Image (cartoon, rainbow, N blue to C red):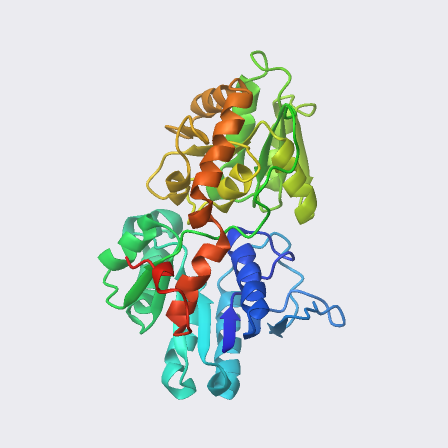
Amino acid sequence: MRICLIYDRLYPIRIGGVERWMRDLGIRLAERGHRVTYLTECQWPAGDEPLSDRVEIVGLGSYRRDDPWGRRPVQPPVRFGLGVFRHLWRHGPRYEVVHTASFPFFPLLAAAALRRRGGYRLVVDWHEVWTKAYWRSYAGPVVGRAGWLVQQACIRATQHALCDSRLHAGRLQAQGFRGTASLLRGLYGGPVTPGSAGTPEPIVVYAGRLTSHKRVPLLVHAFALLRESHPELRLDLYGDGPDRERVEQLVGELGLAERVRIHGQRGEDEVASALARAVCVATASEREGYGLIVAEASARGTPSVVVAGPENAALELVSDGVNGAVSPTSRPSDLAEAIARLADSGAGLRASTKLWFDANAANLLLESSLPVVLDAYGAPSDPEGATAV
């Protein structure tokens, strides 16, 4: 099949779970003989185009130098949506399937508008579906309402929807989706055995963007509370974002320079090695569409701390006391207690975490989602692979 994948970010230039999913999906599809084109925003200087012998990468728009943290102002997604529209106007008929992430919304709207002209199937990844209340709290009453209305327009477009979690699958249907939707449970495309053996190092790892909804400063405050009870622990932060300066300042103010290390964006192998050595992975994020980091850590026998909350689908991947701990709130005291509990659990919890991953690997691995994706494409697949929601 001729397949067009659309997302404005490209891994590893930009780091994130959706970026990883799109990269790994494109590779797996190409390995199975499909011809895959990946439309993305141009994120590289002229002459430095990324090359792939399996996936055709097409950069739309001009290289932007003013976005070092991966933030999305309004204008760039609009321009990217226009670029997608122009590309599909010219080349849409050559694709049998156009597969796009739901957010940013403008490429989805462009692909939906040209679906009949292009004659392709439209498949949409709904990694998150925001409620009207969350839109209002996130962007204010005016912009929040506008975002909500655009999301509603996307939901009503003719498409086959793919959801990563039951949380967002339920929201999609509750907000008026009347098409076909399928549940994906496997986004993890990495190794399935621990990266290292023996006793873990006394480090806690955070890997992800440093943005407001990730609430990394709360992890730093939690470590300040662990200063005396667990003096051996240190926190390693991997990733960049608009909150980096704030986090660095907070580390200095709390006197944690020897215990909290900010590594910035690092290579995939280095982060994977850190996950394997860590006593646990911790995140204070209020909003996750899936929580790929939990699967990545569990594959290596490393438990995870996540925070309970109505926007956090990562809760679906953590069984408290089995492969991690659920902090009841994002208060530093609760986060500190959860981290301490995992740090004190020793080899027993690591063995339990690996057993949990092995028992659930059939649903956690990306390969388990390929039959669902191919079914959405209308391609031959294992009929038992598709899970309707």
Quadrant occupied by the C terminus: bottom left
Quadrant in the picture for residue 126? bottom left
x, y percent for residue 234 = 63, 24
Name the one closer to the observer, 360 or 142.
360
Name the one closer to the observer, 358 or 158.
358
Q: Residue at x 31, y 55 (%)?
A: 169
Q: Horizontally, is 168 left or right of 3 in the view?
A: left
x, y percent for residue 362 = 44, 48
Q: Horizontally, is 292 left or right of 70 in the view?
A: left
Q: Residue at x 48, y 39 (%)?
A: 357
Report whether residue 266 is seen: no
Report whether residue 117 is seen: yes
Q: Residue at x 46, y 43 (%)?
A: 213
Name the one closer to the observer, 350 or 171.
350
x, y percent for residue 195 = 64, 38
Q: Horizontally, is 92 left or right of 251 in the view?
A: left
Number of residue marks: 0
- Residue at the far right: name it: 47
x, y percent for residue 123 = 40, 70
* Residue 321 drawn above or below residue 159: above
- Residue at the far top: name it: 228
